[in-house]
Image: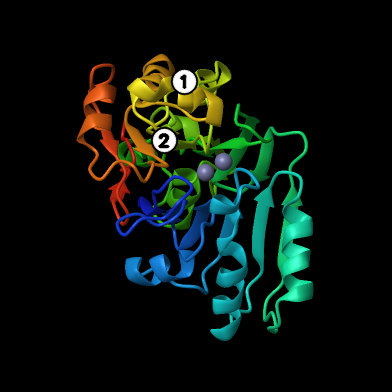
């Protein structure tokens, strides 16, 4: 089952010809999970071939314009395309007033309901059957959240020979066991999934920091992440400016990735001063081997592990 991350916007604060404002799309089983919503996000979605009608949740890290001003335009485009499905928007204090103000002042007819979840006390902010989204406060110049999308463990590998030896008839009962439910055989005996399945297989984990200085609790939050997407607005030489503006440098992001044991690091929110990204990449590579600097429309597929 695919889990694809598409970087729709990778700029920091000011868009450039190469980089749009922050927005990261995660595509999972036909659902779209969007982290941040920079201006022009709908045009980036069109370029990336991401539709406007699917089940969608949007998680906003903080109320700086570069992360949130894409919402009104996205709402309007979705309405012009007659979206009917509910849209969920999550974010810190202010997100509700912003969404309401948009609806009260910008003149278009919204064709779908928007449910806003204002996060005051971050922990598990969204629970779905197969995954959860967790949030923590990070350290920016205004209240700002990091998010983790964590899939629940999947039932272990199904062993047909074990099912046969327990005389479970092939068909719907096999399917139930494969999905982790106990079944009752025609002779009244109950077979538990553990009798025919291997050990549970881990789900995947994606962590997005939003804008932040290096902060201690992030390493724990991103523990064993398959992908850590981290602010690296300025290069290491500009660490004082990064600290002042509430951002991180590549080596700081990489240190967090290393402490977290993250399998892969992607640097994003790249300042307009960097015309090309090799300097940022070099600085992070001194600390962790598996790192990329995000570019607009870069795609990362995270396969399921069979371990
Ligand atoms: Zn920003
Ligand atoms: Zn910011």
For marks 1 and 2, give the one nearer the viewer: 1
Q: Is mark 1 within 8 Å of ligand 2?
A: no
- Evaluate whether residue 218 shows in this view: yes
Indicate left or right for 97 with 182 as reference: right
Q: Nearer the viewer, residue 290 or 129?
A: 290
- For the point 52% across and 38% down, the residue is 210
| Residue at x 74%, y 72% (from the top left corner) | 103
* Residue contact at pointers 1 and 2, CB within 8 angstroms: no
Find residue 240 and name its label: 1
The number of discs equals 2
- Mark 1 is surrounded, within 10 Å at the Cα level, by few (under 14), some (14 to 19) or many (20 or more) other residues, namely some
**Image position of 18 with respect to 261: above or below:** below
Q: Measured from the top left, where is residue 90 in percent x and y?
A: 67, 51
To which residue does mark 2 refer? Answer: 233
Kindly indicate the quadrant of the structure image that contains residue 48.
bottom left
Task: Locate residue 66 relative to residue 280 in the image: left or right.
Answer: right
Q: Quadrant of ligand 2?
A: top right
- Sort mark 2 into few (<14), some (14-19) or many (20+) by Cα contacts within 10 Å: many
State the separation of the CA atoms marked 1 and 2: 12 Å
Query: Who is closer to the viewer here, 148 or 17?
Result: 17
Q: Is mark 2 within 8 Å of ligand 1?
A: yes
Q: Is residue 246 visible?
A: no
Residue 234: x %, y % from top left: 39, 31
Image quadrant for the C terminus? top left
Tag 2 secondary structure:
loop
């Amino acid at each position: 089952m695919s889990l694809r991350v598409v970087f729709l916007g990778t700029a920091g604060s000011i868009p450039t010809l190469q980089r749009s404002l922050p927005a990261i799309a995660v595509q999972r089983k036909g659902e779209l999970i969007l982290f941040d919503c920079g201006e022009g996000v709908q045009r980036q979605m069109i370029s990336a071939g991401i539709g406007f009608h699917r089940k969608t949740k949007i998680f906003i890290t903080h109320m700086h314009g570069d992360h949130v001003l894409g919402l009104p335009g996205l709402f309007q485009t979705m309405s012009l395309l007659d979206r009917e499905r509910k849209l969920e928007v999550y974010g810190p204090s202010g997100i509700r007033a912003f969404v309401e103000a948009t609806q009260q002042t910008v003149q278009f007819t919204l064709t779908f309901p928007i449910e806003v979840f204002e996060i005051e006390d971050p922990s598990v902010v969204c629970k779905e059957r197969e995954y959860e989204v967790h949030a923590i406060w990070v350290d920016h110049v205004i209240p700002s959240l990091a998010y983790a999308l964590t899939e629940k463990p999947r039932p272990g590998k199904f062993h047909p020979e074990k099912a046969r030896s327990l005389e479970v008839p092939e068909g719907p009962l096999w399917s139930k066991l494969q999905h982790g439910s106990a079944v009752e055989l025609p002779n009244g005996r109950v077979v538990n999934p553990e009798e025919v399945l291997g050990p549970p297989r881990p789900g995947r984990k994606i962590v997005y920091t939003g804008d932040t200085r290096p902060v201690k609790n992030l390493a724990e939050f991103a523990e064993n992440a398959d992908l850590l997407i981290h602010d690296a607005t300025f290069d290491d030489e500009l660490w004082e400016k990064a600290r002042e503006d509430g951002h991180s440098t590549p080596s700081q992001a990489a240190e967090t990735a290393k402490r977290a044991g993250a399998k892969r690091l992607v640097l994003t929110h790249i300042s307009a001063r960097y015309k090309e990204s090799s300097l940022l990449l070099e600085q992070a590579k001194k600390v962790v081997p598996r790192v990329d600097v995000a570019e607009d429309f870069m795609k990362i597929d995270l396969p399921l592990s069979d371990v």
